[in-house]
Amino acid sequence: MAARKGRFDWFDLMTPDVAAARSFYTAVIGWKTTKWEQADYEMWTVGNETIGGMMALPAEETKRGTPPHWLAHIETDDVDATVKKAQELGGKVLRPGTDIPTVGRFAILADPQGAIFGVFRPQEPMNDAPRKPGYFTWHELNTTDYQGAWKFYSELFGWKHTRSMDMGPEMGAYWMFGYDAQTSLGGMSNVAVQMKVPAHWLYYVSVEDLDAALARVKQLGGQILNGPMEVPGGDRIAQCMDPQGGMFALHMSPQS
């Protein structure tokens, strides 16, 4: 099976306290964890499927002021060619192409506005993430120049514009994209300007009961930054922060 270029395949949490993060996310979302034998790394699982992992934020990153964060890896058919093209489009290489034995090859990049993401070529084909509780179902770029960012990502991964939503004179457009022009997998906007924060990706996890999940967030020391709110189509969302400072979001569909 050929690689599915542009698919969000893997989600890593970089955190200063692995044990505390494990307790928080397993309680809030219902994930399980399993150790990876080849490194000091834990993997998130939904049922029998692995969706990502977690590791300690390196001390040198902490000293540089890197906050705890989620990092998604986007699939590509050729990591090194993608890295080269990203540079040509104005992106930066934070970690060049690196092999993980028996797993695949990856690199860490920053887009022209500074948002960080990974690219990944798995050694074995990976399944599409279903729109079910426990899986990441929406991928949102909060940036300072969504038009420039869109040019970068659409040329890099071949994403297609699906639709747009006007969020008013201050917020501007919310620009949605997907693998094709019919089904949206995420959106981008200039909300980072209004928030006065650096450009960043924010990832939404589906839950069965949003209100119950948010109660667990607060009970376990996390914060609700925005929401809950209903969005067009009847879905409900909320943006949150874990106790260590990692930002994430929760999503509940009308079918949940």
Image (cartoon, helix red, strand yellow):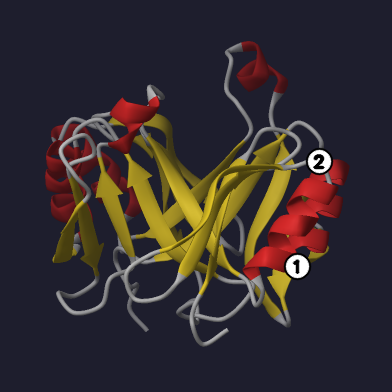
Q: Position of residue 100 (x, y in %)?
A: 58, 53
Give the answer, above or below, for where 11 lies relative to 80: below
> SS of the residue at dot 1?
loop
Q: Is residue 204 left or right of residue 42?
A: left
Give the answer, above or below, for where 64 lies relative to 236: above
Which label sits in the foreground, 2 or 1? 2
Q: Position of residue 115 (x, y in %)?
A: 37, 34
Q: In this view of the protein, which residue sits in the foreground, 163 or 69?
A: 163
Q: How many residues crowd mark 2 within 10 Å: few (<14), some (14–19), many (20+)? A: few
Image quarter hosting the C terminus: bottom right
Mark 2–mark 1 CB contact (< 8 Å): no
Question: Residue drawn 81% across and 41% down?
Answer: 221
Q: Position of residue 138 (x, y in %)?
A: 42, 63
Identify the mark nearer the N-term, 2 or 1. Answer: 1
Q: Where residue 221 is drawn, which disc sits there? A: 2
Q: Of the residues shown, which amino acid type is indicated by label 2?
A: Gly
Q: In this view of the protein, which residue sits in the foreground, 76 or 61?
A: 61
Q: Quadrant of residue 198?
A: top left
Question: Residue drawn 29% across and 42% down?
Answer: 83
Q: Which residue is mark 1?
A: 31
Q: Position of residue 86 (x, y in %)?
A: 23, 40
> SS of the residue at dot 2?
loop
